[in-house]
Image: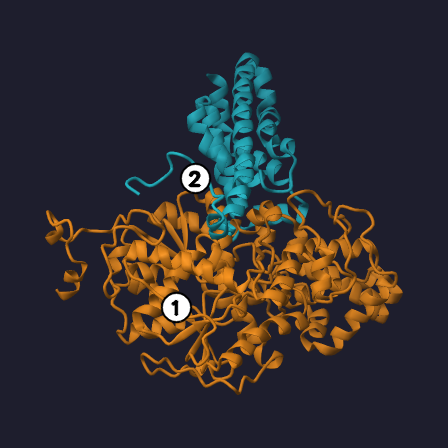
Amino acid sequence: MDTKPEFKPGNYLYAAKASALETVGLPNPRDWNPTDDDWKLPADWKGVVREGIAQRLERFRTFKLFMDICVRCGACADKCHFFIGSGDPKNMPVLRAELIRSIYRGEFKTAGKILGRLAGGRKLTEEVIKEWFYYFFQCTECRRCSVFCPYGIDTAEITIIAREIINLLGCNIDWIASPVANCFMTGNHLGLKPHTFKENAEYLLDDIEEYVGVKIEPSFNRKGAEILFVTPSGDIFAEPGIFTFMGYLMLFEHIGLDYTWSTYASEGGNFGFFTSHEMMKRLNAKMYAEAERLGVKWILGGECGHMWRVVHQYMNTLNGPPDFLDQPVNPITGTRFDNAASTKMVHISEFTADLIKNNKLKLDPSQNDHYTVTFHDSCNTSRGMGLLEEPRYIINNVCNNFVDMAPQTIRENTFCCGSGSGLNAGEYLEMRLRGGLPRANAVKRVAEDKGVNMLSCVCAIDRAVFPALMDYWVPGTDVCGVTELVANALVMEGQGEREYNLRGEENPSYVPPPESEGEAEGEAGEEGEE
Amino acid sequence: MKLKTLLAKHKSAIVKQWINSIVETYPSETAKFLKSKKDQFSNPVGHTIMAETNNLFEQVMEGIDREKVTPFLDRLIRVRAIQDFTPSQALSFVFSLKYVIRRVVGSEIDTEALDQELVDLEASIDYMALVAFDVFMGCREQLYDLKVKEIHSNAYSLLRRAKILVEQPGEEPENA
């Protein structure tokens, strides 16, 4: 508990810009740097922290319980990817939680106040705040440790509260605060305005036309559409997320879905979740506000991680119930999604799996034959909402070569990508390579033993961070969203030769139809008549 | 020749002490974990240390060949290159092998008068250290490359729209 963190390039995240905090009215906006001696905390910062803890002990029964019931059995100690990868013992969940538990004891419990360290208590100092900033941004709130805790202590919730408290002092990171501000003002993390969002989509539609030979014309902000589709904005500008975005467009075209995009609810990601419960609520609200404004029946959500955790675990107490929406029914299959009765929001994997189950998709899995695919369970969708089977069911139907990683590293036991909960900033890559080591290590095993060359996932942060992680730890392994694999296998009506995949690369699994030999302008439609 | 026989005889003791010396570069709680958990997925760092020290010791016995030793060094150094170590701390493990060998078989080297063979062996370990420097720098340089690549990827279509994305000549797919 006595080793002080040393802030060095690569091991800390840049401080939030004052302007980002001002935009959403967060406390103590100022210019500062974690390497400074003086963090310019508010004058009564100790009072703010004490009051902040006291309020949350009152408000969140889980927090109160988690502060009191840990018996230090050590079951969680070696389950954290940051501990495993960094070797820093304060990343053992029990010790990370102890950073705040010791203050709770020292400031709130009689024994701790009197006996101090003898009763496991310590005093609140500026060094403690620096330590919290350092270590609570080395927790991705992935909840793996909670799976192993015999008491069910969810260390992610401790991190959530700890970050919320240091937010009261204005100690946030810019990779969270600026996306939050942009998302609040413009609708997405980068602050893309409606016309930019639409133009980006048009670029990708051009690519689909070029590579697939199908012209798609989706609608934006269309009132009266049956369904609103919301996905992380990373899918519209980041590689390889854009290929998943193209996959959504092709899938919806394939089934003739009556849906629309919103240029304000143009972000599924909710970095408010990494800021405070209030900020999470403010950002989650816009998806539902847009659904109401556009008059849709229900919301379909794309491949995102924490959007789903927020919707699944918090939605109704934040912004619900959304009575203005209907219980989701798949218009193509008639399936009623009872699991979405309260949130009115269905996951794209649930939706796609239902389409496949009801034979509504024309699929040619051989188009993915050059891939041997494995699947990374995103922490949020696996541990946060129990989405375990659907992605695997989809992959097994659109690919011929699927291999799961070692059982202790997937499903509920999945290892985090190491960059979740807003830690996916460029300056933090070195730390992220530590946090991502256990995941990459499991990929490496199946890459070497089973020839896996594609890591699929259903989370935009995964898609953004895995390419670097794979390049460093498992070179030769590509990264994709599950819907990209679906799109590869989709036999689209009126499609051209699928010589190129959505990435514009030659499709190694493409086999020219025998008729086309010698007929330079062979019709693509002939294939479907067989 | 005789030294190698001696080393082969004491291999497990030498490797064990070498592993300990590497594990001790971590805080004590972590060192305990690294040594206790055998599962390669629960304890990838410990597993890598165990496996690669064995492989590297074999290489030292055979005589260091850059091509052959690089993959083993890479697996171990790749981890230490991104952990909280200075370069000298990250690579100290190579030199600690010399110390371990002297500690385990030093007295027998004296009695058998194998000093010259020891000098040769240590030169071989020094050569391994030189290769280790290259591997370490390769990992660090890759880290910086990845940062740039990631920034590009994260804003790929915005950069493409702004026409400021430059593809490296020769990297276009054929026939594209």
Amino acid carrying mark 2 in the image: Glu
Across and down, in percent, residue B26 comes to: 65, 42
- The 10 Å Cα crowd at callout 2, few under 14, some 14 to 19, many 20 or more, is few
The chain identifier of the residue carrying mark 2 reads B
**Position of residue A1 in the picture relative to residue A378 (left or right):** right
Residue A171 visible in rendering: yes
- Closest to the observer, B53 or A322: A322
Q: Is residue A403 visible?
A: no
Tint applied to chain A in the drawing: orange
Q: According to the image, label 1 marks what residue?
A: A218
Label 1: how many residues lie within 10 Å, few (<14), some (14-19) or many (20+)?
Answer: some
Residue B167 circle label: 2
Nearest to the observer: residue A472 or residue A316:
A316
Q: What residue do we see at 63% from left, 60% from top?
A: A74
- Most extreme residue toward the front, as rendered? A195
Choose between A265 and B103: the one closer to the eye.
A265
Residue A283 lies in quadrant: bottom right
Indicate the amino acid at tag 1: Pro
Label 2 residue SS: loop
* Image quadrant assignment for residue A243: bottom left
Furthest residue in direction bottom, as rendered: A323
Nearest to the eye among marks 1 and 2: give it: 1
Tell me whether the residue at label 1 lies in contact with that at label 2, contact meaning CB atoms closer than 8 angstroms.
no
Q: Please state the horizontal and vertical placement of residue A418, each as a whole percent of the image.
A: 55, 54
- Secondary structure at badge 1 equals loop
In what quadrant of the picture does the C terminus of chain A appear?
A: bottom left
Colour chain B appears in: cyan
Image check: A414 left or right of A496?
Answer: right
